[in-house]
Amino acid sequence: MPLSISDLMSKMPSAFLPEKAQGVNATIHFKFTGENAGEWTATIKDGKCDVAQGAPSGPATMSLTADSADYVKIFTGELDGMAAFMQGKIKLGGDLNLAMKLMQMFKIR
């Protein structure tokens, strides 16, 4: 059974590497289109990562918009994240430096 966005988002807190996120205080708004369309919010603060379904209640530090199937492919290694961004498959808004750091803050299997 293929991974769903819900599966991936629920695994984010356990894949979080707090030592790589020292001093980071951010809210990330994920907007997914396609088969697993939906919105999710990840909050990184005080060395913890919390994830909830839905849009953030306040302004987001960064937003990421992607087709759900492409996002899953990035995390399974079938699609390179940077290549997906360059091809327009991932759209980022807000703090782009945070986007670069995000890939290091999580252990990807």
Image (cartoon, rainbow, N blue to C red):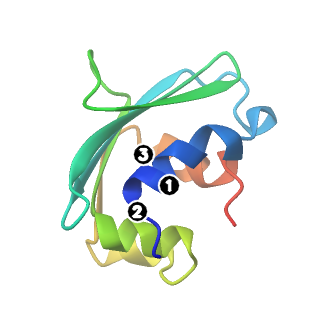
Label 2 packing within 10 angstroms: few (<14), some (14-19), many (20+): some
Residue placed most toward the observer, 87 or 27: 27
- Quadrant placement of the C terminus: bottom right
Q: Position of residue 6 (x, y in %)?
A: 41, 51
Count up the numbered dots: 3
Residue 92 in the image: state x and y as whole percent. 31, 51
- SS at mark 2 in the image: loop
Q: Do labels 1 and 2 touch, CB within 8 Å?
A: yes
* Amino acid residing under circle 3: Leu
The relative height of residue 78 versus residue 82 in the rendered view (above or below) is below
Residue 81 visible in the displayed image: no
| Residue 62 relative to residue 78: left or right | left
Question: Disc 1 versus disc 2: distance between alpha carbons?
Answer: 6 Å
Snapshot quadrant of residue 91: bottom left
| Mark number, residue 8 | 1
**Pointer 3: residues within 10 angstroms few (<14), some, or many (20+)?**
few
**Location of residue 49 with respect to 95 vertically, above or below:** above
> Could you tell me how far apart the alpha carbons at marks 3 and 1 are, in whole angstroms?
22 Å
- The answer, for residue 29, to whether it is visible in the render is yes
Question: In front here: 49 or 103?
Answer: 49
Answer whether labels 2 and 3 touch (C-beta < 8 Å).
no
Q: Residue at x 75, y 32 (%)?
A: 18
**Res 4 quadrant in image:** bottom left
Instruction: Give the mark, 3 or 1, whose residue is nearer the N terminus.
Output: 1
Q: Picture coordinates of residue 97 (x, y %)?
A: 50, 44
Q: Secondary structure at mark 3?
A: helix
Image coordinates for residue 20, horizontal then vertical, percent: 75, 39
Mark nearer the viewer, 2 or 3: 2
Instruction: Check residue 4 in the rendering and tell me which mark sits there, or answer none.
Output: 2
The kind of residue on which mark 2 rests is Ser
